[in-house]
Image (spheres, rainbow, N blue to C red):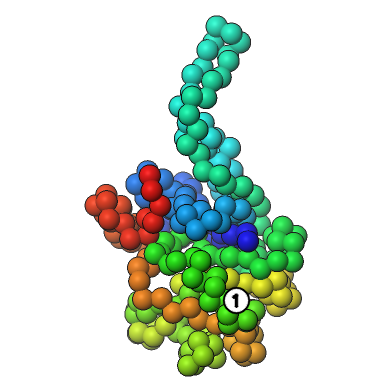
Amino acid sequence: MKVVLLAGGYGTRISEESHLRPKPMIEIGEMPILWHIMKQYSYYGYNDFIICAGYKQYVIKEYFADYYLHRSNITFDFRNGNELTVHSNVAEPWRVTIIDTGLNTMTGGRIKRIKNFIHNEPFLLTYGDAVSAIDINDLVAFHKKQGTIATLSAIQPGGRFGLLDINNDSIITDFKEKKKEDGGWINAGYMVLQPEIFDLIEGDSTVFERYPLEECARRNQLSAYKFNGFWQCMDTLREKNLLEELWASGKAPWKVWND
């Protein structure tokens, strides 16, 4: 099952950092938050990634172009025509496809643009700016049991997020994105989607969190994987600093992998 990562937005709310690079490339503990997300999926056995790039997409491409060398011990022997010897390779077993999905494309449009890379199979999707301690295998098992077109992870952070109405069968009956009520369940990303979701995305101007998910809810085809553990987005500099502090403490809740 492929993992699709949304990494194309401008990140205007953390412009102190994002004016130089895409928000998913902002570092936590000297590694991009995108890397942290990928490490979590990889821990659960998902190593085939599709990155939906946009704003400063070349930064993401250059990072992965050099990733193998950056993560290995090497010797350059200039006496023999610049011979390169790799002594140890600690790079992950990843397959990374980076697609330029456009500068101003909406989230739904970015997903639509990578349709041909999915090959009509279920896939995982999340945002490139939030980390969590969610058990990905448990999420996938829940999605299969529910049998709906879409499953999203639902948490209760309170505050400035939109609300979800969830019935007793874990079916979302209303999807109210980006309103100002306090409390309630909100969309934390970490989704599992059937390929039928592409039929609900018209084009580049489609906001995925609007019609596609709202229509799934109207059809009783949107499930909620309720999660009460750690989740944190990185929308602001304050939130970045919080994640930095957690990482520096050696007790980052999202770090399920071994060094």
Say above or below: 65 vs 232.
above
Image position, residue 14 (x, y; %) = 40, 58
Count the marks: how many?
Answer: 1
Q: Residue at x 51, y 17 (%)?
A: 76
* Crowd tier of the residue under label 1, counting other residues whose Cα lies within 10 Å: few below 14, some 14–19, many 20 or above: some
Q: Residue at x 50, y 71 (%)?
A: 139
Q: Label 1: which residue?
A: 144
Label 1: state its secondary structure. helix
Between 145 and 68, the one lying in front of the other is 145
Say above or below: 214 vs 41.
below
Image position, residue 155 (x, y; %) = 40, 77
Q: Quadrant of the C terminus?
A: top left
Q: In this orientation, does residue 242 appear?
A: yes
Q: Quadrant of residue 61?
A: top right
Between 105 and 88, the one lying in front of the other is 88
Q: Quadrant of the N terminus?
A: bottom right
What is the residue that sits farthest to the left in this orientation? 249
Image position, residue 54 (x, y; %) = 60, 54
Q: In this orientation, does residue 210 appear?
A: no
Q: Residue at x 45, y 84 (%)?
A: 163
Image position, residue 113 (x, y; %) = 70, 61
Between 211 and 139, the one lying in front of the other is 139
Left or right? Give the position of 217 relative to 198: left
Say above or below: 212 vs 111.
below
Q: Residue at x 52, y 25 (%)?
A: 86
Q: Amino acid at mark 1?
A: Lys
What is the residue that sits farthest to the top in this orientation? 79
Left or right? Give the position of 171 relative to 215: left
